[in-house]
Image: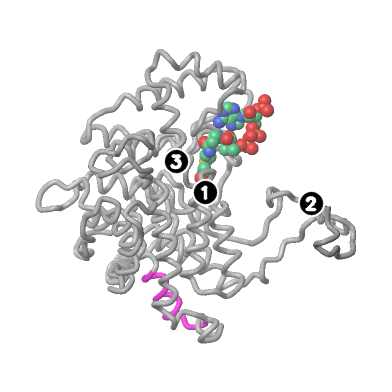
Amino acid sequence: LGLSIYDNGYLNTAVCRSSISYIDGDKGILRYRGYEIEDLAKHSSFLEVSYLLIFGDLPTREQLQVWETRVMRHTFIHENLVEYLKSFRYDAHPMGMVTSALSAMSTFHPEANTALQGEHIYEDETMVNKQIFRCLGKVPTLAACAYRHRIGRPYNTPSNELGYTENFLYMLDRLSENNYLPNAKLARALDVIFILHADHELNCSTAAMRQMTSTGVDPFICLSGAAAALYGPSHGGANEAALKMLEEIGSVENIPSFIEDVKAKKRRLMGFGHRVYKSYDPRAKILKNISEEVFAIMGRNNLIDIAVELERIALSDEYFIKRNLYPNVDFYSGIIYKAMGFPVCLDAKKPFPGFPTPFPTDFFPVLFCIARTSGWLAHWHEQLQNPIPIFRPKQAYEGPEPRKYVDISQRT
Ligand code: CMC
């Protein structure tokens, strides 16, 4: 084939050097810029973690204050972008709306377009930072507009006195306590979930972000491409599959027969197993604890009991032990999102409460997209500093040998 290595799907090829996140799959370790994910989840905030991911170090108090103010100042979106979002069909999938709006942002900010302005624009740090503020600030607003669109309610403008995640919940008008202010404990829980999803080295969408960055296209288009990759059910949709599985199991008594089906390879245990983690995914442990905090406020549902028992049985079963199958991040996140009332399509025939008609309602990947935007931007920023030649992987050609064109009248 004239190729030195055939690596189907880049499973074994390092395509960049990075200092952003580190995973030890055997030991179940995830670090952002050297900090343990457990410490960040306990002590930090999503915006502080975003700063860390993008700029490499934790901010000082002053740096954090400036950073938060700048990001929150960029939460508003252009009125014409609002009109664009309004033009989507009433039942448009929110991920389709967010992905499209991200690429539309490119046309609203032509000064960030290297094709128009020249590649040198990103030698200017102010210019780079401006795009980072814009992207991080506006993604939750786009997501909230997509949500409000689905429920047929007017879009809410951001409230910049609130924190990043609080403001997002405020724009959704969800989980409010009084005066439309979100419940502080639930906002903190979601903020921690955003921290856990912020980066995960070179996953499919981040690889897409880097691939597009290598062409020199602006960051809005890159983010749109990364979000499009995330939309795929094998990437951003696994938590929904895990939730559906728990719903289907229905009660703790049905777990043993379900496990037998899994062992007979009739089913997969969704939310279990990972390409990189061959021990407990550290994010899953944190999420398990968060679920209890959320249930204390929103009420417990039986899915968590099924999940905990399923985990207990699986982790003591030879089949799972031998194959190093442990819960991954998606095992508990779907249960938490459902408890918080985020829409998910478990049965396309039944409308989600509060939704007018029975169409698929799935907001989970949008939440993932908000969080992962910080990781995508960190990789964009790193790649601007350490440019990679335009991505051009090789293929192994397996098509026909050269042949002559046949006129349509002669074809059989
Ligand atoms: N349930 C039952 N058996 C499994 C599972 C599972 N979830 N995952 C792997 N196995 C078995 C598989 O059948 C195989 O058995 P055998 O050796 O007898 O053929 C063995 O374990 C190795 O499987 P594999 O497919 O080679 O493992 P992989 O590392 O390529 O797959 C995975 C990783 C995530 C695709 C897989 O574990 C899976 O399909 N899990 C369920 C879906 C899921 O939860 N996806 C979310 C992943 S986390 C996302 C993120 O980090 O962003």
Q: Is residue 176 magenta?
A: no
User: Does the rendering let one see residue 74?
Assistant: yes
Position of residue 360 measured from the top left corner of the image (x, y, whole percent): 38, 43
Residue picked out by circle 2: 6
Residue picked out by circle 1: 232
Query: Marks 3 and 2, Cα distance to the nearest angstrom?
Result: 33 Å
CB contact under 8 Å: marks 3 and 1: no
Position of residue 325 measured from the top left corner of the image (x, y, whole percent): 57, 29
In the picture, measured across the screen, residue 28 lies left or right of residue 7, that is left
> What residue type is disc 1 on?
Gly
Name which of mark 3 and mark 1 comes first in the sequence: 1
Q: Residues within 10 Å of mark 2 (few under 14, many from 20)?
A: few
Name which of mark 1 and mark 2 comes first in the sequence: 2
Magenta stretch in the rendered image? 123-134
Q: Residue at x 48, y 53 (%)?
A: 199
In the picture, measured across the screen, residue 216 lies left or right of residue 168, that is right
Position of residue 397 measured from the top left corner of the image (x, y, whole percent): 81, 56
Q: Residue at x 30, y 38 (%)?
A: 351
> What residue type is disc 3 on?
Arg
Q: Ligand 1 is found in which quarter of the picture?
A: top right
**309 over 346 or under it: above or below:** above
Residue picked out by circle 3: 283
Tell me the quarter of the image containing the N terminus. bottom right
Tag 2 secondary structure = loop
Q: Residue most toward the front?
A: 409
**344 over 369 or under it: above or below:** above
Viewer-nearest of labels 3 and 2?
2
